[in-house]
């Protein structure tokens, strides 16, 4: 079983919107510290009927995820 993720190991996050079967799927991609075996982690958040709704949800999700980062993205 892989060890649990900790927000202190996250470096950056971004949202990816893809279209699947006529719906727009929001996926959160989290960039972890390089020495982890799962360097990039993806979480499917939800699917939405329109791209506009998916983009609004993506903005909210990324803003909330960035609050939990221990430092600014790529800052040392």
Image (spheres, rainbow, N blue to C red):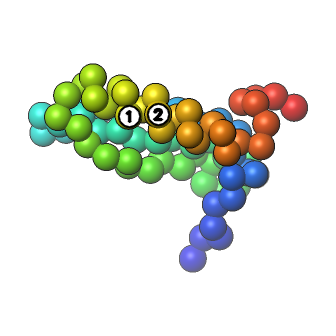
Q: Is residue 7 left or right of residue 71?
A: left
Residue lying farthest to the right in this orientation: 76
Q: Does any portion of residue 32 appear in the rendered image?
A: yes
x, y percent for residue 71: 79, 36
x, y (%) of residue 67? 66, 39
15 in relation to 33, above or below:
above
Q: Which residue is mark 2?
A: 60
Q: As drawn, which residue projects farthest toward the bottom?
A: 1
Q: From the top left corner, tell me how far across and down residue 52 is, in percent.
A: 27, 23
User: In which quadrant of the rendered view does residue 74 lie?
Assistant: top right
Place residue 47 in its image quadrant.
top left
- Residue at point 38% right, 34% down? 57
Name the residue at 12% across, 39% down.
Answer: 21
Say whether residue 12 is left or right of residue 59.
right
Residue 34 seen from this side: no
Quarter of the N terminus within the rendering: bottom right
Question: Of the numbered discs in the image, which one, if any, rests on residue 26?
Answer: none
Which element is circle 1 on?
helix
Quick check: 23 above or below 9?
A: above
Where 40 falls versus 55 (above or below)? below
Please give the residue where the numbered disc 1 appears in the rendered image. 57
């Amino acid at each position: 079983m892989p060890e649990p993720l900790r927000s202190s190991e996250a470096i950056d996050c971004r949202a990816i919107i893809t279209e699947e079967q006529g719906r727009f799927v929001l996926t959160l991609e989290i960039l972890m510290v390089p020495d982890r075996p799962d360097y990039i982690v993806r979480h499917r958040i939800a699917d939405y009927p329109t791209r506009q709704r998916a983009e609004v949800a993506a903005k909210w999700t990324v803003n909330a995820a960035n609050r939990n980062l221990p430092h600014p993205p790529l800052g040392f």
